[in-house]
Amino acid sequence: MKFAAIADIHGNCLALEAVLADIAALGITDIVNLGDHVSGPLEARRTADLLMARDFVSIRGDQDRRLVELAAKGPDASRRMDFLELEPHHFEWMASHKPTLLYRDEVFLCHGTPRDDAAYWLDAVSNSGIVSLAPIEAIEAEAVGVEASLMLCAHSHLPRVVRLRDGRMVVNPGSVGLPGYEYANPVPHVVEAGTPDASYAVCERSHAGWFIAIRHVPYDNQAMAAMATRNGMPAWGSALATGWIR
Ligand SMILES: [Fe+2]
């Protein structure tokens, strides 16, 4: 069993195309998508069209859920660029996704944690806003009741591979489309991947266990950085240009 895990595309269609080309070049045909497909100041409609055409096994992210909730209030619910670009069939597609999924009976998929699509699983934020690897006890507590040897999460945009003390693994493939951001909850903090490249994971099970490879894929990130800045999101522009928020 071998497949690719992509996540947190956030409307970055150029990054998505580069990642899909890399996956194809590796000869991998099975792909799972952990959500946050389109939200942001980039190319929501183009990204949604591509994802709908490819029809990957997908779950919804917290930002997908928020867009669907907005759409339920009517076409005038928001002036957000992503919301205005999307059409009813895009919202229906996002609304059709579940928050969690068991893939091929052995890989658990969620966006944040098994119980919360907007919480970090592998990352902790200190009271002063420092983001670091979460304590193993906290990571294991979230995995209680999940019957899978491999669990995939996303949301923090930081690629991480953690092996629990019982042998199970939790993997965050990082973000295809947004390598850093500023966020207000639970306390103000920044996330920085340290590279602008698109990130995803290759997961392969052998007799010895799961082999995980995080791939960092270069693409024309400056074009997307310029687009984000042009569309009024300079922090996105910085993250897309460099992998850092400055
Ligand atoms: Fe998210």
Image: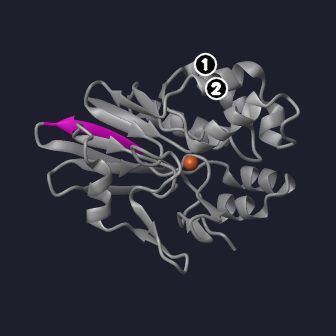
User: By what rule are the colours in the image chosen?
Assistant: one colour
Residue 214: in magenta span: no
| Residue 50: mark | 2
* Label 1 residue SS: helix
Looking at the rendering, the stretch of residues picked out in magenta corresponds to 201-206
Instruction: Name the kind of residue labelled 2 in the image.
Output: Leu
Q: Quadrant of the N terminus?
A: top left
Quarter of the rendering containing residue 88: top right
Q: Quadrant of the C terminus?
A: bottom right
The residue lying furthest to the bottom in this view is: 128
Q: Which residue is mark 1?
A: 53
Q: Residue at image x 37%, y 66%?
A: 134
Q: Residues within 10 Å of mark 2 (few under 14, many from 20)?
A: few
Q: Position of residue 136 (x, y in %)?
A: 27, 64
Q: Taking 145 as reference, is 53 left or right?
A: right
Q: Position of residue 98 (x, y in %)?
A: 49, 28
Instruction: Name the kind of residue labelled 1 in the image.
Output: Ala
> Can the viewer see residue 162 in this picture?
no
